[in-house]
Image: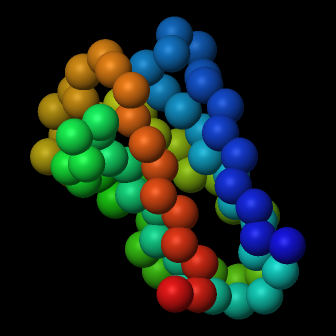
């Protein structure tokens, strides 16, 4: 079963996103703001059937702080 879990870290500005794959697959994991704009790509590669932990440090793709607020993670495996 493919799964994705999230846990906040320390001061709430970082998050750990952990996913498990039952079989090898192409995986993407992207962070979006509430307006639907992509903030950052955390994962974009072929992955083995493993459990993997991606850390988001609260920064956008340029390295600047994304700011406080609500963000969404979009996880796609095999599609």
Q: Position of residue 13 (x, y in %)?
A: 43, 20
Q: Position of residue 14 (x, y in %)?
A: 48, 27
Q: Is residue 1 left or right of residue 58?
A: right
**Circle count:** 0
Q: Position of residue 66 (x, y in %)?
A: 24, 30
Quarter of image, res 46: bottom right
Quarter of image, res 58: top left
Q: Is residue 24 above or below residue 35?
A: below
Q: Is residue 19 left or right of residue 22?
A: left
Instruction: Decide if residue 22 is in sight here.
Output: yes
Q: Is residue 9 above or below residue 36?
A: above
Q: Nearer the viewer, residue 26 or 76?
A: 76
Q: Is residue 70 left or right of residue 63?
A: right
Q: Nearer the viewer, residue 66 or 72?
A: 72
Q: Is residue 71 above or below residue 10?
A: below
Quarter of image, res 67: top left
Q: Nearer the viewer, residue 25 or 50?
A: 25
- Who's the residue at 37% across and 49% down the image? 31
- Who's the residue at 47% across and 80% down the image? 45
Applied colour scheme: rainbow
- Who's the residue at 60% across and 25% down the image? 8
- Who's the residue at 51% across and 10% down the image? 11
Looking at this view, name the residue that lies furthest to the top: 11
Quadrant of the frame with the N terminus: bottom right
């Amino acid at each position: 079963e493919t799964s994705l879990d999230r846990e906040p870290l320390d001061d709430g500005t970082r998050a750990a996103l952990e996913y498990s794959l039952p079989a090898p697959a192409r995986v993407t994991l992207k962070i979006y703001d509430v307006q639907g704009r992509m903030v950052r790509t955390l994962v974009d590669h072929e992955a083995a059937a493993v459990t993997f932990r991606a850390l988001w440090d609260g920064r956008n793709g340029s390295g600047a702080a994304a700011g406080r607020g609500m963000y969404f993670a979009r996880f796609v495996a095999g599609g």
